[in-house]
Image: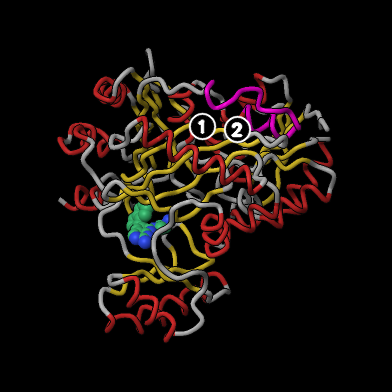
Amino acid sequence: MLRPITKVLIANRGEIALRVHRACREMGIRTVAVHSTADSSAMHVRLADESVCIGPPAARDSYLNIPSILSAALITGAEAIHPGYGFLSENARFAEMVEAHGLTFIGPSPDHIRMMGDKIAAKDAMRRLGVPLVPGSDGALGSLEEAREVAARTRYPVLIKAAAGGGGRGMKVARTEDELEEAWRVARTEAKAAFGDDSVYLEKYLDRPRHIEMQILADNHGHVVHFGERDCSLQRRHQKLVEEAGSPVLTRADRDALGVTVTNALKQLGYRNAGTLEFLWQDGQFAFIEMNTRLQVEHPVTEMVCGVDLVREQVRIASGEPLGYTQSDIEFRGHAIECRITAEDPDTFAPSPGRVTMFHAPGGLGVRVDSALYSGYAVPPHYDSLVAKLVVHAATRAEAIARLERALDEMVVDGIRTTLPLHRRIARDPDFRAGDYTIHWLERFVAR
Ligand code: MV4
């Protein structure tokens, strides 16, 4: 059954609101921007066909204000809501309420969002579906004694993780049995305080993994395809700074094999729309850790390599259309790298909001800038510090790095501090150029 979409409400701000607007505009779909009082002159409001103010600057009163957003959709006659990333994008209750109001949520079903939000339920599902996992507990730990038994079997070091966690919150390492009781207690206390849920599970701690994730799309007709992997190992405090497609360490055969595993799993799960499976990769082995049920910040590197508009596909899927292509139609051409440029001090990472006196985006062959900046725009202090994503694409990784250095040198963001100088340093680094890094590399690079 087709659910034609002629107007989409974009429940987000900044570059991702623009990204969604651009896909809709190209599809002949009208757009409704929502914004806080701090964002009245933001680019996503300027470009949208209509806009609705949904509250004061604090996100909880505006971009997280479900009644305001639903009212804005109903008043403007939007048939569908795209949540972008962050904010309400992985809120199962929100997806349910959107559907309960007769609107289409451009994303997965509420049940799948809820399942993947519970990291234990997500691992249970993946275990059942034959996806490789990090060794550890089968589900939640019932007691400290059980944690001791599982840890002894798994062998130290181990991690205690919060079921409701993810993105690095509520995780404690125990390097030896002496440290287990403390890790167990602290993880549970923190999980209870942060998420209102003290369920925890245990995994073998991998000490030098890479973070590699697979992008998939699924339609409502049982078709699932993957768009290869992204290597997101270059992160600091669980904030990614640089992402690549493909991973410098994977072969074509590795990608194809993992792709078969994840597409089969999601087909059996009846998953729909866009999704990303996160893996840790160490010593040539993949281990699933979490699944994200949203469009991700770093989706452009996949788009550049596969030549697909993932947001357009999300909208098409939400309107009930079949994918219209199969796995063998997906080609991987060249290499793409994304730099996340944030309004932060490049040495201390202190936030640096304020007036952008001049913005000049680089251009030329194989260069893409996703940004809501313009000269004269004031970056508000209330939200995420991401101000631009610089994405380069070239035939090989070496050529992509040369293009990245060239584009970083062209780019100008004056008036605020940004991480541009840090990205220029990373691009020059021999380890980065060799593709020789783990999830710990960037923290050490920043420290020296
Ligand atoms: C791990 C791990 C090592 N071993 N699990 C951090 C965020 C969450 N998504 C999972 N995380 C990790 N889980 C086991 N069994 C190391 C991390 C981790 C990490 C993972 C991906 C990207 C960056 C990271 C930074 C620190 C720790």
Q: Nearer the viewer, residue 350 or 106?
A: 106
Under circle 2, the secondary element is helix
Residue range in magenta is: 312-329
* Residue name at image x 71 percent, y 26 percent: 49
- What residue is disc 2 on? 44
Question: In which quadrant will I find the N terminus?
Answer: top right
Under circle 1, the secondary element is loop
Query: Is residue 314 located in the magenta-colored stretch of the structure?
Result: yes
Q: Nearer the viewer, residue 192 or 406?
A: 192
Residue 116 place in picture, x, y as percent: 58, 56
Evaluate if marks 1 and 2 touch, with contact meaning CB atoms under 8 Å apart. yes
Q: Is 279 left or right of 42, judged from the image as shown?
A: left
Q: Amino acid at mark 2?
A: His
Q: Amino acid at mark 1?
A: Ala
Q: Is the residue at mark 1 in contact range of ligand 1, meaning its CB lies under 8 Å from it?
A: no
Disc 1 and disc 2: Cα gap in Å?
7 Å
Quarter of image, res 322? top right
- What residue is disc 1 on? 372
Residue 279 place in picture, x, y as percent: 41, 49
* Residue name at image x 75 percent, y 53 percent: 96
